[in-house]
Amino acid sequence: MTDRPRSSRYDVIVVGGGIVGLATAVQLLRERPRRLAVLEAEARVAAHQSSHNSGVIHAGLYYAPGSLKATLCATGRDAMYAFCAERGIPCRRTGKIVLAADEHQASLLAGIRAKGEANGLRGIIEVRGEAVRDHEPFAAGVAALVIPQTGVVDFATVARAYADEIVERGGEVHVGSPLVDAAVHPDGLTLITSRETFTTDFAITCAGLQADRVTAIFGMDPGVRIVPFRGEYVELLPHATHYVRALIYPVPDPRFPFLGTHLTRLVDGRVEAGPNAVLAWSRAGYARSDIDWRDLRDIVGYGGFRRFLRAHYRTGLAEFARSLNPRAVHRALQALVPEIALDDFVPGRSGVRAQAMAPDGRLIDDFHLVRGDRMIHVLNAPSPAATASLAIGARLAGLVREQRGEAPARPAATS
Ligand SMILES: Cc1cc2nc3c(=O)[nH]c(=O)nc-3n(C[C@H](O)[C@H](O)[C@H](O)COP(=O)(O)OP(=O)(O)OC[C@H]3O[C@@H](n4cnc5c(N)ncnc54)[C@H](O)[C@@H]3O)c2cc1C
């Protein structure tokens, strides 16, 4: 993606050309001109999570107030809408509903709303009974929250626009450049890809599904293990897409960081349902049959995973069984929209989440960084990291500035 001659030495190198790494490079370059390169393993940017997701610009409803997810989602969401407007990227602020199937779930809506309001969301309303149908005419359920700030976009298009901005600002994006080794010297770092060697003052790694391994390349202990969870979607056939106006979410299960199977009208007008959350046997396990023996060994050999399994095997097995059974998927969809029939949908695409797991088996919920001398490693950047990417990038750019002892940034860079 870069056709200029490359620098002989860099100020900052970002490893990982997903939406988080690219947004970080954008924010570093908005602050001040820098000799900067992004190294991406695949032949194109945004090849993994950043192009295999639900495409939802999250409002910031469920996150613990004060958490990084909550604060960065709020600023990142607004920055995302502004970036799309500026670059002419199609996106729609459609709003969404969180649908309570029964009175027990309805009793949880007030708590979700309070969290959203504590996170700065205004204009949330709760509707009951028939009033739910004013927002989603085919939705079942006894009550719903209506969240106006939610929207849809294609995050892969956004990521490509970030890459364009990096090059416009004098940075470099090297695709097909997997980092394979790194050496730390008193005066800088040497990064070795399968093609070239780079020297830099500072490195940031945003390697998604490989985050723990890439961190270890730098001699750092990641402290967590990445465990891949596949999310599978089904797609409504064209004759059934009218059942969904915008986005219909269930009340989430508070025990898990995933939001539950939801119905989404994508920015191109198609309607998808999903994703579920099934353990994947490969970090690129987009198909059920994908097995990578090294990945599998890493998962089952991890004490944290065995502890996780002991606590959650029933839910895991149920989710796995449902993933194989179209009738079970159908039941989950009918809980949201009863009119959806078994022959109204077909299997769709899938994505793989990079979920960081602690040695005690906990799924790390918030964004998580590990910092070292001349380096920062992003170990957990789950949803809503695509929504929040510009805010995460601004935060990381601030940390780089702090670690490098640089003067404060130009004010425009924080948006
Ligand atoms: C099923 C699913 C649904 C989701 N839905 C939403 C949503 O609706 N809204 C939302 O905001 N978020 C959503 N997310 C989360 C969002 O997609 C991710 O948080 C975000 O894409 C993470 O971006 P990233 O750049 O950290 O990771 P990635 O996009 O995975 O990028 C990491 C990059 O690092 C590269 N890399 C790895 N190893 C190396 C190496 N050795 N050298 C060089 N490069 C390397 C990889 O090739 C990859 O391109 C969803 C995620 C999934 C999986």
Image (spheres, rainbow, N blue to C red):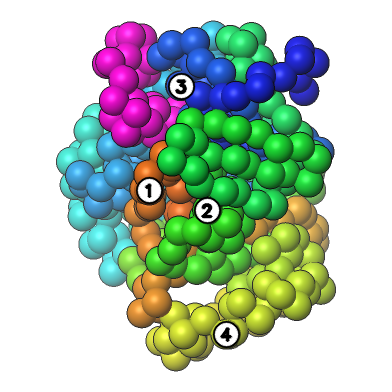
Residue to which mark 2 is pinned: 218
Residues at circles 1 and 2 in contact by the CB criterion of under 8 Å: yes
Q: Earlier in the sequence, mark 3 or mark 2?
A: 3
Q: Earlier in the sequence, mark 1 or mark 3?
A: 3
Q: Earlier in the sequence, mark 1 or mark 2?
A: 2
Residue to which mark 4 is pinned: 301
Q: Nearer the viewer, mark 3 or mark 2?
A: 2
Q: Which residues are magenta?
A: 387-415
Q: Nearer the viewer, mark 4 or mark 1?
A: 1
Q: Residues within 10 Å of mark 3 (few under 14, many from 20)?
A: many
Q: CA distance from mark 4 to mark 2?
A: 22 Å
Q: CA distance from mark 1 to mark 2?
A: 9 Å
**Image quadrant containing the N terminus:** top right
Q: Earlier in the sequence, mark 4 or mark 3?
A: 3
Instruction: Identify which amino acid the numbered label 2 is placed on.
Output: Phe
Q: Secondary structure at mark 1?
A: strand
Residue 264, image quadrant:
top right
Tell me if residue 44 can be seen.
yes
Q: Is residue 311 left or right of residue 402?
A: right
Residue to which mark 1 is pinned: 372
Q: Earlier in the sequence, mark 4 or mark 1?
A: 4
Which mark is on residue 295?
none
Tell me if residue 135 can be seen.
no
Residue 38, image quadrant:
top right
